[in-house]
């Protein structure tokens, strides 16, 4: 799949390359983040800190866009993944970082400018573990 993705010029084309289950998951995560953000904003303690509130859910939608570079055989495998396959899956934030680098260079279009950094952070850091 990676070879065909290299010729794509828009995020819409990349999203179409993903299985429906993946894009549905991305939509659900975006909606949940939007819901959580709205709830947090309802507390006066944090109201002022969410100027970009309306962008959080939209940006969170892109959190798994790097999975477009994962071979479909791995992404849709119904059985348990091997250690090697898990290693490939775990690379999707790195693939997303490369995608967002291309977006910033203007080589790929489709994400509004005000969302690019927030979406990139969502895609690159959503598996970070904080102690």
Image (cartoon, grey):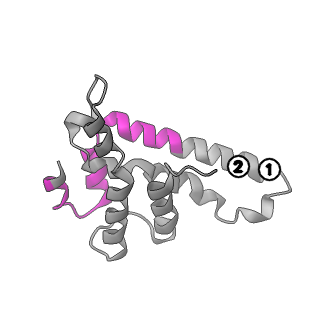
Q: Position of residue 52 (x, y in %)?
A: 64, 64
The quarter holding residue 72 reads top left
Q: Is residue 106 shown above or below 84?
A: below
Residue at image coords 35%, 58%: 94
Badge 2 density bin: few <14, some 14–19, many ≥20, Cα 10 Å: some
The residue at 45%/51% (across/down) is 63
In the picture shown, does residue 51 fall above or below 68? below
Q: Which residues are magenta?
A: 3-29
Pointer 1 with pointer 2, Cβ within 8 A? yes
Q: Main secondary structure of the magenta part?
A: helix
For this view, does 47 lie left or right of residue 12? right
Left/right of residue 74 with respect to residue 54 in the rendered view: left
Q: Which residue is mark 1?
A: 42
Residue at horizontal 38 percent and vertical 41 percent from the top: 23
The one of 95 and 59 positioned closer to us in this rendering: 95
* Residue 33 left/right relative to 6: right
Tell me the element at label 2: helix
Kindly identify which numbered label has been placed on residue 38: 2
Depth order, front residue of 128/117: 128
**Would you say residue 54 sits in the magenta stretch?**
no
């Amino acid at each position: 799949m990676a070879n065909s993705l290299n010729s794509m010029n828009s995020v819409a084309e990349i999203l179409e390359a993903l299985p429906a289950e993946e894009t549905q998951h991305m939509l659900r995560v975006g909606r949940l983040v939007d819901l959580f953000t709205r709830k947090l904003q309802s507390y006066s303690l944090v109201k002022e800190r969410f100027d970009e509130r309306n962008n959080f859910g939209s940006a969170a939608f892109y959190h798994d866009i790097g999975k477009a570079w994962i071979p479909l055989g791995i992404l849709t495998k119904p059985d348990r993944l091997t250690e090697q396959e898990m290693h490939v899956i775990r690379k999707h934030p790195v693939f997303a970082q490369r995608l967002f680098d291309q977006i910033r260079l203007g080589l790929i279009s489709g994400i509004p400018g005000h969302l690019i950094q927030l979406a990139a952070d969502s895609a690159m850091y959503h598996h970070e573990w904080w102690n």
